[in-house]
Amino acid sequence: MSNNTIFKDLIVIRTFFILVVCTYSLYAQKNIDFNRFDEILEEKYRTGDFSGISLISVNGKVKYEKAFGYADFKDEELLFTDSEFNLCNGSDIAKLLSISWLIEQNKVSLEDSVSQYLPEFEKYPYITLKNILTHTSGLEDINPDNELTKYNDNRSLIEEIIQKQDNVNTGNYKYSHVNSIIIAAVIEKISGLKFEDFFYETISPIIGLPRTEFITLKTAFKHSKADSRYALGYKKTQSEEIIEMDPENETLNYPEGNLWSGGNDILKMYDFLFQSEYISDGTLEKVLGSNTSPVLFKKIGSIENPGYGFEGECDGYNVLFYYFPGTKTQFILLSNYGFSDLFNDEYEILKVINLI
């Protein structure tokens, strides 16, 4: 076989490979049914089952952006896509961004024992940061002795967490807010700052997050409604009446309060992690766990087009936001209707619009 023949064959093979990759990417992007998605949200809004916002971004460009309903029904303040929603368990994205940054700066390793940073964990030297971040630590949630906002920081809770554990065995996945508190405490130990202050002073300025903060529902209720900054949460009574959540009975999972954020800020958070100069491919590979056990993220979708993200449900709120690296697609759906059945099978809506 001549060199020219071999060269031509290599060109054909390479061209075929490029065509396959490009065709796959274009296929995944072209088949997102934006019209069908809009129809679903419009119908849910019309029937009183949805109030919220949604954004879909492909390859860095927002292809769908819409708000439905009110940030405050009483004062008839409309929602905007930058209105801040309680992210519930999705608050973990702040820990993910922070720990990814510290990994990038060589300040921490996923294989480190937690006891290296928190001496209270000397009782459990086998629990690593990876166990904590993948919710395989075996640690159980606790009923704290005080309201969480009464604790000065996350580190103040560590001794109590340790005292209330029994038969801790690592390995099996079980979501626990305790894990999120522990990783925040580790970040506090490394930085010398409260977790929220580290996020505000280090992570937020890099990304540019004007609509992201740790607050409580009480704070949101006290804020001027003029700019629809906060989307107040709502629930439905047994008589089907829609009423706003009582800020005095808010369930909090973290001393700093839950993370509240708007749609465009969430887009920027994902861009920081997946498409910026700040997080290297090596760090990202560690965070994604080589497609096996992603750190903090929940993984959905297919092997060819996996999605990484967060889901959350809490007092008056439902949230769902995912990033699909294969097609550089972001999907964000935030609601201040805690009762919306749109989230009963959140994967179904992703299937309907051909995203998974």
Image: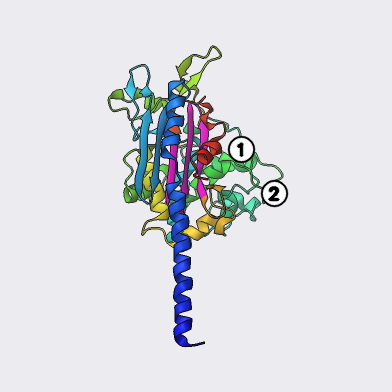
- In the picture, measured across the screen, residue 172 lies left or right of residue 16, that is right
Which residue is painted at 48% across and 88% down in the image?
Answer: 2
Above or below 195: residue 287: below
| Quadrant in which residue 162 is drawn | top right
Residue 305 visible, this orientation = yes
Residue contact between numbered discs 1 and 2, judged by CB atoms under 8 Å: no
Residue 141, disc: 1
Q: Amino acid at mark 2?
A: Asn
Q: Nearer the viewer, residue 268 or 347?
A: 347
- According to the image, label 2 marks what residue? 169
The secondary structure making up most of the magenta span is: strand
Q: Amino acid at mark 1?
A: Asp
Percent from the top left, x then y, of residue 191? Answer: 42, 52
The Cα–Cα distance between marks 1 and 2, rounded to whole angstroms, is 14 Å
Which residue is painted at 39% across and 55% down in the image?
Answer: 275
Q: Which residue reaches farthest right?
A: 167
